[in-house]
Amino acid sequence: MWVLVLGDPDERTMDGIDLKIIGLLQEDARMSFSRIAGKLGISVGTAYNRIRSLEESGVLKGYTAIVDPAKLGQTLTAIVLIQADGKHLVEVEREVSKIDNVICVYDITGDYDIAVIARFKDRFSLNAFIKNLLKIPHVKRTVTNVVLNVVKEDFRVRPL
């Protein structure tokens, strides 16, 4: 399965055709221009131009494969909350973002400043990750939650 990565639309105005194209590409990012055109009742040239325009404006940031992490040996997912020294928050987020196990970094409100989602082969890898997080300058403390069961995990964007 393939996934489409969406970005900020900048100042580009999108219409219903653009939104339908985005929906089709999120279902199958390898869908051909001619198949998109056929499904939407537009010319192949129009489909091509619309997609190129969405890419150039940054709405479509790229295309990537959706991989089953368990099949690659990453059977443990953790949600880690980080408290950081406020004036160094961006630095901490940048450092955490560089770590290979990390798949998401969020700036959040509440008692903690950062939420991190990361995947690991085992609890030993998670343990090492947490210890390394605590070594990052300006990290005050962490709270780690281990995911027991994935109920829903879908990063596609549903255009309104």
Image (spheres, rainbow, N blue to C red):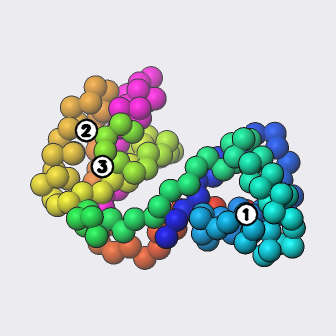
Query: What whole-number distance in Å separates the C-alpha atoms at marks 3 and 1?
Result: 35 Å
Near mark 2 (Cα within 10 A), the count class, few <14, some 14-19 or many ≥20, is many
The quarter of the picture where residue 21 lies is bottom right
Query: What whole-number distance in Å separates the C-alpha atoms at marks 2 and 3?
Result: 12 Å
The numbered dot on residue 101 is 3
Residue 128 visible in the shown view: yes
Reading the image, the residue beneath label 2 is: 133
In the depicted structure, whether residue 90 falls above or below residue 101: above
Question: Which residue is painted at 74% across and 41% down in the image?
Answer: 57
Instruction: Where is residue 76? Give x, y as percent.
Output: 25, 64
Residue flagged by tag 3: what amino acid is it?
A: Asn
Number of dots carrying numbers: 3
Residue flagged by tag 2: what amino acid is it?
A: Leu
* Magenta residues, start to end: 76-96
Specify which label sits upstream in the sequence, 3 or 1.
1
- 9 or 40: nearer the eye? 40
Q: Which is in the foreground here, disc 3 or disc 1? A: 1
